[in-house]
Amino acid sequence: MRYILLLGPPGSGKGTQVELLKKEGFKVLITGDILRNEIEKNSLLGERIKRIVNKGELVPDDLIVELMETIIKEDTSSDKDIIIDGYPRTVGQVEGFLKNHSDEKIIAVYLKVDKDILKKRLTGRRVCPVCKRVYHIEYNPPKNDMKCDVCNEPLIIRKDDEPEVIENRLSVYDKQTQPIVELFENKGLLRVIDAQRTISEIFTDIKEILM
Ligand code: AMP
């Protein structure tokens, strides 16, 4: 059993690839969705998380590490690889993760994309409020009328995909997340994928790594 950590800036296509992997039967954990579920519960914790996520900031490391490690532990009952989107996301989270899992079980897959392309991708992103499937108005539109292909629900813009929040998320990424790419590279655990190609080309590369 291995941990496949998907790394990359907001808009690098992690969510899209994770959806495809899920469809093919891979086991995936999506940190953003786990947090959004917590928000929907309207719990005290959910309220606290909502205020942070809506600004494009990161939820504190201790909270995320505890939440994610609990979920990962529940999931390690089988021998299947686990693909994780969105965790770890800071140097502190990597330290928390490495305390619990050994290096030989880890592959960090970095989806590399230039910044100008990221902004274009993020402003066109739409999601289904019911099944959370991710679309793009230009690159990956739904079959009809801005409605989800599966649920037929009108697609929405995520609160944190609004323009000023996007700017903040990209700068938070540069400061807090990009350093972990180097950290995994120095440990010899990093695989880099050119994520400026088509969705299916990127998917093929990821699956090759998973073989
Ligand atoms: P995502 O859907 O992965 O872009 O995540 C949406 C938001 O959830 C981020 O902008 C953060 O506010 C929060 N978030 C997701 N993953 C983490 C993490 N590992 N650490 C802290 N905050 C996170």
Image (tube, helix red, strand yellow):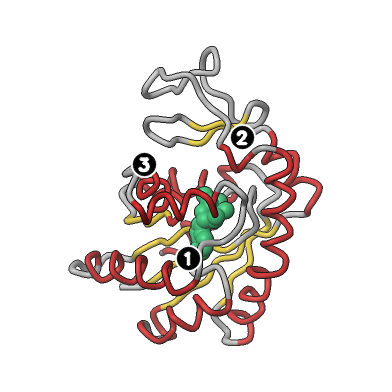
Amino acid, disc 2:
Arg
Q: Which residue is mark 2?
A: 125
Q: CA distance from mark 1 to mark 3?
A: 20 Å
Q: Position of residue 29 (x, y in %)?
A: 37, 57
Q: Is residue 87 above or below residue 121?
A: below
Residue 87 disc label: 1
Q: Which residue is mark 3?
A: 40
Quarter of the image with the N terminus in it: bottom left
Amino acid, disc 3:
Glu
Q: CA distance from mark 3 to mark 2?
A: 21 Å
Report how many numbered discs are placed on residues in the image.
3
Q: Position of 44 compared to 175: left or right?
A: left
Q: Identify the residue at image location x=32%, y=56%.
A: 27
Q: Which is more foreground, mark 1 or mark 3?
A: 3
Task: Give the residue furthest to the right.
Answer: 116
Precedes in sequence: disc 3 or disc 2: 3
Precedes in sequence: disc 1 or disc 3: 3
Q: CA distance from mark 1 to mark 2?
A: 21 Å
